[in-house]
Amino acid sequence: MMEVERPKIEGSIKVGDDRRMGFAEWGEPGGRTFFWLHGTPGARRQIPLQARAYAAEKGFRLLGLDRPGVGASTAYRYKSVSEFPNDLITVADALDIDEFAVIGLSGGGPYTLATASAFPDRVVAAGILGGVAPTVGPERIGGGAMELGVRAAPLVRVAGAPIGQVLSSILSVAKPFGGPAVKLYGLTTTKADREALNRPEFSAMFLDDLIFGGRRQMTAPFSDILAFASDWGFQVSDIKVPVRWWHGDDDHIIPFSHGEHMVSLLPDAKLYPLPGDSHLSTLHQATDIIDELNAVWDIERPSKK
């Protein structure tokens, strides 16, 4: 596997009386800020290498965050997705970031929408890539991976932490076996995702993030499942921030119909279908997502370049 360059800055910030949140930064500190929220599983380095280079080239600031229970973020279980935005805002305040865009991949989608809902004065635009949809309440939609997640929630509530400990133990010694493991997973997935994982820079990014983020703790994915299987604590249809949604029409994890459903609920949203793409392969859109949100920024707040 190829080596992946470390982030420009990495660390953790206090977000509660006894909690910290890990972050990684690329690009230009004084530029427009884009928070990138990882999928499930994932951690703060789950950002395509081309997006990192693009941020540096264009003078943008790109920040990845560890959700609680992975990387440098203290383990913690949110009662609902709506609790997350206060942690992100604490990080933004500590880093002297006033306004920003948020991008969420898959399991990062609900947290992106929650932040847009809670802080419309600070979130200029939101971008979602194959995001998870509500599983309960009037805005719910069935099917996809979260159908299994809802059924597994009672078991996850009891066994999630012990399973997470086992996974982190495995990941702590997994690097020599990472390449073959990625190839093995590729055999089980769709053609588009398999082709994406065969690209050295793509598989190296995912492996670097998974091993670095999960080698000490790995309870975040299980906390995500429980949060997604519960009421999110806000209504998607109340979000006023502009949302742009990208979704592969061959997504085998979060069905394309979920993207259509979510965009139909959002007051100011646009759906970008990605023909032939599945779940992971959509990350080739990373720089286009940044460009689109930057264009929305120019329209929404033209006086602030």
Image (cartoon, grey):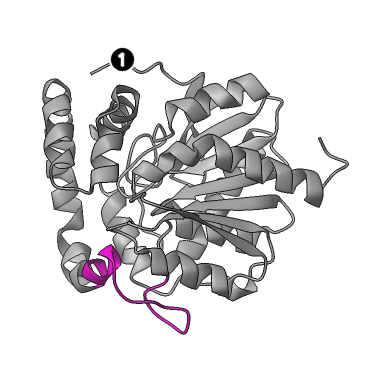
Q: Does 73 sit left or right of 155 as displayed?
A: right
Dividing the picture into quadrants, the one containing residue 264 is: bottom right
Residue where numbered disc 1 is placed = 3
Determine whether the residue tagged by mark 1 lies in a helix, strand or loop.
Answer: loop
Q: In the depicted view, which residue is nearer to us: 191 or 102?
A: 191
Tell me where the magenta segment starts and ends, as one range: 134-150
**In the rendering, at what x and y percent does residue 265 appear?**
56, 74
Q: In the depicted view, which residue is nearer to us: 295 or 138?
A: 295
Residue visible at 47% across and 60% down in the picture: 110
**In the rendering, at what x and y percent does residue 190 appear?**
23, 49
In this view, 36 is above or below 152: above
Q: Quadrant of the C terminus?
A: top right
Q: In the depicted view, which residue is nearer to us: 88 or 281?
A: 281
**In the rendering, at what x and y percent does residue 171 appear?**
17, 33
Can see residue 79?
no
Q: Does 159 sit left or right of 280 as displayed?
A: left
Q: Residue furthest right?
A: 303
Main secondary structure type of the part rendered in magenta: loop
Residue visible at 38% across and 77% down in the picture: 141
Dividing the picture into quadrants, the one containing residue 292 is: top right
Can see residue 82?
yes
Residue visible at 60% across and 52% down in the picture: 126
**In the rendering, at what x and y percent does residue 236 appear?**
56, 71
Q: Residue furthest front?
A: 275
Q: Is residue 189 magenta?
A: no
In this view, 101 is above or below 97: below
Q: In the depicted view, which residue is nearer to us: 145 or 76?
A: 145
Amino acid type, label 1: Glu
